[in-house]
Image: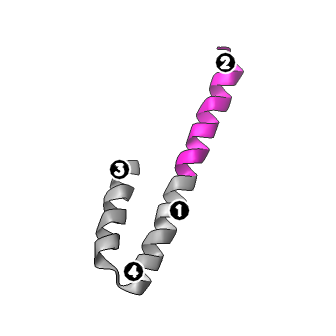
Amino acid sequence: MNQSRLQIARKAQQTHRANIQRSIEHRLQVARAQGNEKLIRQLEAEMKHFS
């Protein structure tokens, strides 16, 4: 694979990871607003996995 393809693949991977983190953060905000402690714990664990 040439260098530009590697850079494109890395950028796509970074973008994908950032999108997942934003999604989890949003879901965490909603869970907190609803007071859903079980979901909050699950989402916090998921965030640690992606950090």
First in sequence: mark 2 vs mark 1? 2
Question: Which one is earlier in the sequence, the residue at label 4 or at label 2?
Answer: 2
- Does the image show residue 24? yes
Quarter of the image where one finds residue 44? bottom left
Above or below: residue 26 compared with residue 16: below
For the record, the magenta segment spans 1-18
Q: Which residue is mark 1?
A: 23
* Residue sticking out furthest to the bottom: 34
Cα distance in 3D space between marks 4 and 2: 43 Å
Which quarter shows the N terminus? top right
Q: Decide: marks 2, 1 in contact (CB < 8 A)? A: no
Instruction: Give how far apart the Cα atoms at labels 2 and 1 are.
Output: 30 Å
Mark positioned earlier in the residue sequence (4 or 3): 4
Amino acid under label 3? His
Element at badge 3?
Answer: helix
Q: In the rendered image, which residue does mark 4 sit on?
A: 32
Q: Secondary structure at mark 2?
A: helix
Residue 39 x %, y %: 34, 71
Looking at the rendered structure, the kind of residue marked 1 is Ser
Q: Is residue 51 among what the camera can see?
A: no
User: Which residue is the site of mark 2?
Assistant: 3
User: Can you give x and y, in whole percent of width and height, for residue 9 in the image?
Assistant: 63, 30
